[in-house]
């Protein structure tokens, strides 16, 4: 089974300059996902990344979301690495397509280039989810798997949490 990963930018791939403010970042020529795939010797991963398309998810528009949904439709086991602020908006567009496959969306609260990043952990969870989930659109964050419409990003903690009662 081949897992197809689309890296769209977001915090996962941000490279900050020293002493820079939050908005002073760049996206490098190669996604951090490529380094993770290489370091862990993952052989069943195909990566799609275009530095020109990489952006902060707050800057994404309907054209970007349509591109991502089209890409997911063309892959058998898609994983999307996305900025956390608007990944649920993108999940909504993908879900509206009614694809008969599992689509997994993940991201990071800390850049993969930082020491205390959650990027590798979240990507690993997403790769496992892509191999085992039933059809649907899922968010993998913070060691948890959510249906896209049953979670939200907590604006205080930045972590994803269930919107279902009692969860």
Image (cartoon, grey):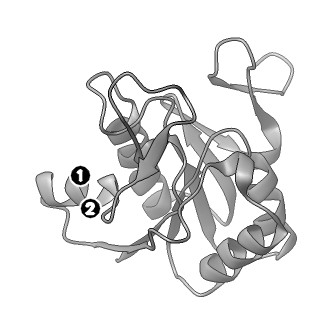
Q: Is residue 3 above or below residue 133?
A: below
Q: Look at the image and tell me whether residue 128 can be seen.
A: yes
Q: Looking at the rendering, in which quadrant would you find the N terminus?
A: bottom left
Report helix, strand or loop for mark 2.
helix
Q: What label does residue 34 carry, if any?
A: 2
Q: Residue at x 32, y 27 (%)?
A: 18
Up the image or down, 25 lies above or below 71; here it is above
Picture disc at residue 69: none
The span from disc 2 to disc 1 (Cα, nearest Å) is 5 Å
166 or 163: nearer the eye? 163
Query: Residue 144 vs residue 69: left or right?
Result: left
Q: Residues within 10 Å of mark 1 (few under 14, many from 20)?
A: some
* Labels 2 and 1 touching (C-beta < 8 A): yes
Residue beneath the point at 53% across and 82% down: 75
- Give the side of residue 42 with respect to residue 21, left or right: left
At a point 57% along the width and 35% down the height, the residue shown is: 23
Question: Which quadrant of the view contains residue 27?
Answer: bottom left
Task: Point out residue 156 in the picture as x, y percentages from the top left corner.
Answer: 72, 12
Residue 36 bears which disc, if any?
1
Which image quarter holds the C terminus?
top right
Q: Nearer the viewer, residue 144 or 86?
A: 86
Q: In this picture, is 146 found above or below 116? A: below
| Coordinates of residue 96 in the picture (x, y in percent) | 87, 69
């Amino acid at each position: 089974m081949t897992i197809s990963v689309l890296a769209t930018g977001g915090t996962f791939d941000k490279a900050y300059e020293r002493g820079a403010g939050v908005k002073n970042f760049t996206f490098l020529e190669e996604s951090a996902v490529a380094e993770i795939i290489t370091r862990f010797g993952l052989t069943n991963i195909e990566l799609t990344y275009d530095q020109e398309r990489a952006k902060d998810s707050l800057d994404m528009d309907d054209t970007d979301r349509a591109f991502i949904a089209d890409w997911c439709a063309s892959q058998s086991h898609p994983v999307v690495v996305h900025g956390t602020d608007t990944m649920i908006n993108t999940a909504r567009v993908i879900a509206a397509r009614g694809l008969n496959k599992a689509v997994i969306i993940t991201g990071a609260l800390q850049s993969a280039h930082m020491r205390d990043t959650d990027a590798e952990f979240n990507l690993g969870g997403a790769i496992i989810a892509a191999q085992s989930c039933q059809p649907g659109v899922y968010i993998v964050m913070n060691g948890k798997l959510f249906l896209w419409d049953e979670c939200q990003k907590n604006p205080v903690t930045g972590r994803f949490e269930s919107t279902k009662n009692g969860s």
